[in-house]
Image (cartoon, helix red, strand yellow):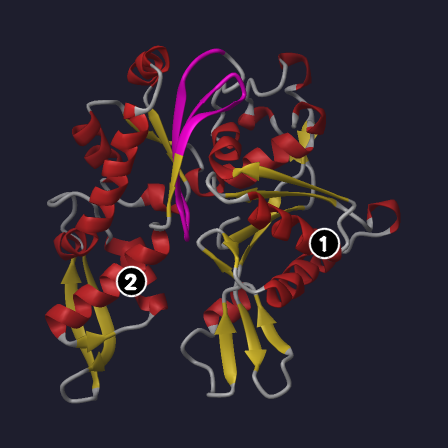
Amino acid sequence: MSDILEIIKTRRSVRKYKSDMVPADIIDKIVEPYFGENMYILIDEETKKPLAVGQEAKDMLGKTPGRVQAIRPLKDGVIADFRITEILLTHFINKLNLKGIFARPTILICCPSNITSIEKSAIRDVAERCGAKKVFIEEEPKVAAIGAGLEINKPTGNMVIDIGGGTTDIAVLSLGDIVTSSSLKIAGDVMDADIIKFVKDKYKLLIGDRTAEQIKLEIGSAVKGSSDKTFEVRGRDLVTGLPHTITITSNETELALRETCATIVKETKHVLEQTPPELAADIVSRGIFLTGGGALLTGLDRLLESELNVPVFVADDALNCVANGCGVMLENLHYMK
């Protein structure tokens, strides 16, 4: 489960998400797309009641009075606060306005590839308390691969690197399941923290999470010299205590993100070292696919390709691959475990 919750709503064709996870004769079934909500909630510390959830809560980050606290109940892909998670899930399900026989939906939740059975049970329990009729839990890289249109049901090696908000999941798949995988608690959130630290150390300027994320989205880079973009950063000067503005370059973000990107490269090498030789040969010819919001970091595909000597591709609609894969799997539950 990432920091964006994907929930199924209205219907559309799945033809663009065609995958050999399911047989060709049912490929043209229809699935329901998602609406995306950020996993944030604002809580009044005095009344313990939620004031805002989702994107509305995220927009208020760093701008609330002292008695209002912004909470992310999911950390590193697992539940950190059960009560708040239940409030969020209930809100999102209610937003679908389900009635009659659909009032108790079937829910598919994605989780990192290395979480424990206890953590999976906790996720299932929260979803059931929110009114789910059935709850399915699948590993995120597998669902992302299906959403990216990879033919994971064939005896062919496919490799996916899914870079979300809390975790980076790296997996090799064949015959519809994961052969070898690894999960890092290093992803988009850590990249934001890296940018905050870099600006603080170099410019003595304190910025918030939202500003750091905006810098990453606008000019973030994994390769030096890949862009000459600049970005005006506003924050509080740690020396004078006054508001101050600086200009940061894309090359500076590469320096800030270098260690995090190097860790992802190192872990990808480790997974490849554990891959059976026949599947490794398939990966060399088919390449590695990047999914998730982190896949959109400028130059990350080129960095991985140069370090691994394997073709690397950013999946179409990388940000929504997990949501798209959820739609395919929910329409074909009989192919799930």
**Residue at image point 18% right, 82% down:** 237
Which numbered mark, 1 or 2, is in the foreground of this view?
A: 2
Label 2, secondary structure: give it: helix
**Residue at image point 71% right, 55% down:** 93
Return the residue nearer the eye: 132 or 243: 132
Q: Is residue 165 above or below residue 180?
A: below
Residue 311 lies, in percent from the top left, at 26, 23
Q: Which mark is residue 55?
A: none
Q: Quadrant of residue 268?
A: top left
Residue 167 lies, in percent from the top left, at 40, 48
**Residue at image point 82% right, 51% down:** 103
- Residue under label 1: 96
Amino acid residing under circle 1:
Leu
**Residue at image point 49% right, 50% down:** 2
- Residue under label 2: 193
Q: Quadrant of residue 276?
A: top left
Label 1, secondary structure: give it: loop
Amino acid residing under circle 2:
Ala
Q: Which residues are magenta?
A: 155-181
